[in-house]
Amino acid sequence: MKLATLRTGKGTTTAALAVGTESYVPLPYSNLGELLAYPGWRSVVHAQAAAAEQDAKLINASDVELAPLLPTAGKVICCGLNYGDHIQEMGRELPEYPTLFAKFADTLTGPADAIEVQGSGEVDWEAELAVVVGSALYRADEEQARQAIAGYTVANDVSMRDWQKRTLQWFQGKAFDATTPVGPVMVTPDEIEDHFEVRGYVNGELVQAGNTGTLVFGPAKLLSYISQFTQLRAGDLVLTGTPGGVGMGMKPPRFLQDGDVLITEIAGIGRLENRIHINPTGGATTQPLVIATSTNNATATKE
Amino acid sequence: MKLATLRTGKGTTTAALAVGTESYVPLPYSNLGELLAYPGWRSVVHAQAAAAEQDAKLINASDVELAPLLPTAGKVICCGLNYGDHIQEMGRELPEYPTLFAKFADTLTGPADAIEVQGSGEVDWEAELAVVVGSALYRADEEQARQAIAGYTVANDVSMRDWQKRTLQWFQGKAFDATTPVGPVMVTPDEIEDHFEVRGYVNGELVQAGNTGTLVFGPAKLLSYISQFTQLRAGDLVLTGTPGGVGMGMKPPRFLQDGDVLITEIAGIGRLENRIHINPTGGATTQPLVIATSTNNATATKE
């Protein structure tokens, strides 16, 4: 099945089941993460889908916007340097351990949202497969981790390279609010292949392509590794790294320009399409903006 | 005023006002973060304190355990390399930008809790001043950031150096569940000096000391800087870095041993006293533990 989070109003969302590409069945949870936190989520989805079909309570895809898939994810953990073929073509050795860093849910944005960046002149792309955690996991082996995968989605770990390179720790270049698109849907493992073709395009030009079959640390291995030191819960999100072809690695380096369209695509899951708005000099201690005060409503500031 | 989060039962907590060192007035919020999220929190505290005094509804300090001060903090952001005198004595230049990394609330633990570490043989200490955010902050200047500080507390960013050094990113060595003690109370800025003496002791021996007056990026500057890229909210926590004297820097390096007692102290705020339990070979894909499934109850696994 394919599950999404839809915007239903100013700062409000609902979990939904995608029916074909044309419509959704709304589900009685405020987003996908809330749905997954309920252990019997699969039967809830089936029951609601059956009821909706009888009552024809479908929502047309053209009538709604998609929210970031997991707007209140408790943990968003990213892996860097994970595509084996790209690492080897660069002449490096395969890493023994995954390079991990953390994000907060505020960094996420919707699959078709404009991405507004203030204060950076080096905005780069990182197309990625992301794994959605479906049940609690702590000190789990790889097989237990595999069982705990709820599904897969698409993400772009858009990175402000100038901020990322200011210090040894990447966090500040990776944590700008509402700059990591995630979605459009989560696809459950039974519906898709084990390996995914991940592609990134800038204004229609293919800039990145990689197959997750070449990941040094695949989804289950990553979840198992992370769970050795911190518990993962339903609705947490793990980004698996990006293949070769980022702008920073080009000669000369190439970065996103104001108005560019970034497309991130995984066959069998879907595509993100985000227009980029950049104000390289803005954001530096000017006037404060009106912002959300709730810790549980990451989408509220975006409308 | 001095505010705390008390354990009231299995996985349940309450915010409380400390009265002297002997007792607490319980407040009608489940923890300090929930209290601070209510804009009129100061008047709530005053009203409850007055009512409690009339009805003598005080809780004896000896009857309760302290929880991690902010068990559900949305953001925990840490700064490294921030004590100017220590950086200069090492012959390095002062940094232009703060080195930042993120933690999740699961990493926090109570001010008197035992710290259990599995799978690391290089457990190190980092005594720190921590700043509690009191109101929402986004793209704020330094003065706005200063106004948004709810108060100060004590933390120890206990670090698993073997895991921290596995890759370029420190996260995995800093994010072991329930290893960063925070508390015992948050002291509001009106009650204390601007600069703090931070001290760390292992089994009674002073190993770290530094004055926050020598911070390259002081509390308001740090909050302002972080707010340029991500919004901060009431109840978020910012750790300001550690002075010289960590075990990794000693010759030969010295790490915590099973049974050691780690004390972290800031005069005017309070002290953390945590016994360390270490199983260097444990935790590697053995049996899964029973864990919490709620994303909003970081304390539930600890009892």
Image (cartoon, coloured by chain):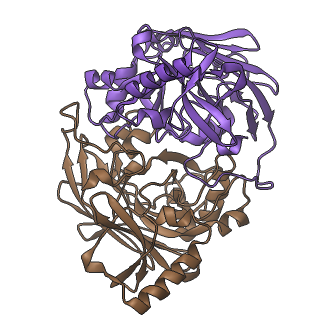
Chain colours: A purple, B brown
Q: Position of residue A253 (x, y in %)?
A: 71, 21
In the picture, measured across the screen, residue B85 lies left or right of residue B208, that is right
Q: Can residue B141 be seen?
A: yes
User: How many discs mark residues in the rendered view?
Assistant: 0
Who's the residue at 52% across and 18% down the image? Answer: A54
In the picture, measured across the screen, residue B252 lies left or right of residue A276, that is left
Relative to B122, say whether A8 is above or below.
above
In the picture, measured across the screen, residue A95 lies left or right of residue A181, that is left
Q: Position of residue A45 (x, y in %)?
A: 45, 25
Looking at the picture, tell me which residue is in the foreground, B38 or B163: B38
Quadrant position of residue B275: bottom left
Q: Residue furthest bottom?
A: B54
Q: Position of residue B208 (x, y in %)?
A: 38, 65
Relative to B132, say whether B232 is above or below.
above
Q: Position of residue B198 (x, y in %)?
A: 44, 70
Who's the residue at 49% across and 23% down the image? Answer: A51
**Where is the C terminus of chain B found, in terms of image quarters?**
bottom left
Relative to A10, say whether A79 is above or below.
above
Looking at the picture, tell me which residue is in the foreground, B45 or A249: B45
Quadrant position of residue B8: bottom left
Quadrant position of residue A4: top right
Looking at the picture, tell me which residue is in the foreground, B53 or B264: B53
Q: Can residue B251 be seen?
A: no
Relative to A162, say whether A54 is above or below.
above
